[in-house]
Image (cartoon, rainbow, N blue to C red):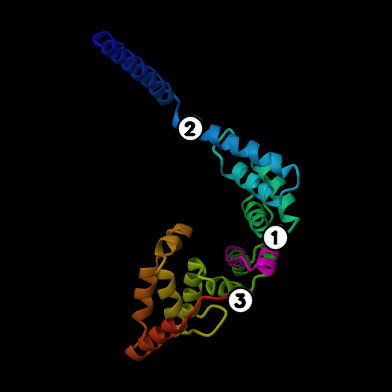
Amino acid sequence: MKSLNIFLVVAALAVSAAAAHIFFKAADVAPLELELARVQSDIDRNRLLADKGDVYAQHRLGNLYRTAKPPLQNYAKALIWYEKSANRGHPGSQYALGQMYANGRGVQQNYYKAAEWYRLASNLAGLADAQFSLGELYFNGRGVPSSYGLAIEWYTKAANQGHAVAQYFLGQINKEGWGADENLIEAYKWLKLADRHADQVLAHSPRNDTKRALASLTAKMNNSQIAAGEKALAAWKPGR
């Protein structure tokens, strides 16, 4: 019995040593290497489906190549797979292509082409991000004629779906009277809505401070206007 116990102890120590060896070998692998290996595995798996015409796998491949860390990141390959998926009607790929053309990623910067892809994703799928981005192009006159009216139209479509940055811009537009009459009550409603997701608004640009914009706005409003703004805010419901 005693010899059996000694054997069991020795066996347990051997297993522990083997486990420790495996642990320390894994610890020798840098986090970046592990991440790249995982992404490469995802690329290989989705490539098999994408080559067979799977539109969702094609979109995922575009995402993987676009967002991967170097050396796997490849904007040119992302563009190829996004185009395959976008041409078959995938709204996420259509929006992503708009972003790549707008930012010159994997292709020469071209706001006109960006507007074409944004419009497809906006009209066919009602994608809020694409609607907002199209509104930005009209607001700044990039790739399309400058038009506050059309910018407001597309911002409103996105804002009504809960797009916080579009809500912020609509608040500022109504506050300043850009392309429309000044409307402090509408400005209050949109800025209050945007302030619910102030972090998203700030992430778009560090200049987009919802609280500062609200403080500037309410300084111009009387109590009855603020009450009307609160009523408009309470009545707002998300939709398209």
Image quadrant in which the N terminus is located = top left
Is residue 73 among what the camera can see?
no
Q: Disc 1 designates what residue?
A: 117
Q: Secondary structure at mark 3?
A: helix
Of mark 2 and mark 3, the one earlier in the sequence is 2
Question: How far across and how far down the image is residue 74, in percent?
Answer: 63, 39
Q: Amino acid at mark 1?
A: Trp
Name the disc covering residue 153, or none: 3
Above or below: residue 25 compared with residue 159: above
Observer-nearest of 113 and 74: 74
Name the disc covering residue 32, or none: 2
Give the class, few, some or many, for how many residues have Cα within 10 Å of label 1's Cα (few <14, many ≥20): many
Magenta run includes residue 93: no
Q: Amino acid at mark 3?
A: Glu
Q: Residue furthest left?
A: 2
Most frequent secondary structure within the magenta stretch: helix
Which stretch appears magenta? 120-131
Is residue 59 among what the camera can see?
yes
